Image: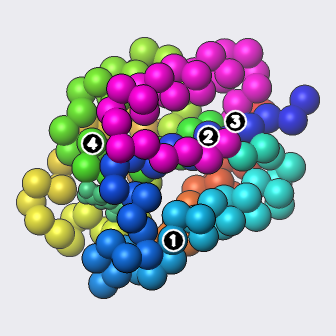
Amino acid sequence: MTQSVFVLNGPNLNLLGTREPAVYGSQTLADVEQICAAACQRHGLELVFRQSNHEGELVDWIHEAGRLHAEGKLRGLVLNAAAYTHTSVALLDAVKGTGVPMIELHISNVHAREAFRHHSYLSAAAKAVMCGFGVAGYGLAIDAMAGWKA
Ligand code: DQA
């Protein structure tokens, strides 16, 4: 059975391309989706790629990913929760509550930025954390996930 990979993006990531290009680069979210699609294709995985500016919608999607994982239909979740990384107990609880294997991802190196970006509520529930690779990180995360047990 072909497994899928969920890539979920949080608030303001729809603005990629024009949003603080010195920090996030000039590639758009559509470009990021292409990077993810190419990585999934390399590994015979199906891509589900979404973005929301709403915390509850992200919670619902993590639950959906969790259900698929329980059925053996999902390899894992790449989660760039954006600003919710630094604020959201709800997203932490969603990942913990579903047990979905998750890679926490940030385009920028959050540790080289403002102090409020140094803490992540999500890292405690992540299998792996990656930041600072730019949008290429998404492809690297999927490459890593492809090596996980199906
Ligand atoms: C981000 C880093 C967060 O601190 C920020 O709020 C974002 C994007 C990143 O991808 O580098 O919106 O998650």
Whether residue 80 can be seen here: yes
Q: Earlier in the sequence, mark 4 or mark 1?
A: 1
Residue stretch rendered in magenta on the structure = 48-75
Is residue 120 shown left or right of residue 102?
left
Q: Is mark 4 within 8 Å of ligand 1?
A: no
Disc nearest the viewer among 3 and 4: 4
**Above or below: residue 14 compared with residue 1:** below
Whether residue 104 can be seen here: no
Q: Quadrant of residue 109?
A: bottom left
Is residue 113 shown left or right of residue 64?
left
Q: CA distance from mark 2 to mark 3?
A: 8 Å
Which residue is painted at 68% across and 21% down in the image? 68
Q: What type is the residue that disc 1 sits on? A: Thr
- Per the image, the residue denoted by label 3 is 75
- Per the image, the residue denoted by label 2 is 6
Disc nearest the viewer among 3 and 1: 1
Name the image quarter holding the C terminus.
Answer: top right
Task: For mark 1, give the secondary structure.
Answer: loop
Q: What type is the residue that disc 2 sits on? A: Phe
x%, y% of residue 105? 43, 54
Report the coloring of the rendering: rainbow
Task: For mark 3, give the secondary structure.
Answer: strand
Q: Is residue 100 magenta?
A: no
Residue in the foreground of this view, choosing between 99 and 66? 66
Crowding at mark 4 (Cα within 10 Å: few <14, some 14-19, many 20+): many
- Per the image, the residue denoted by label 4 is 84
Q: Earlier in the sequence, mark 1 or mark 2?
A: 2
Task: For mark 4, give the secondary structure.
Answer: helix
Q: CA distance from mark 1 to mark 2?
A: 18 Å
Q: CA distance from mark 3 to mark 1?
A: 25 Å
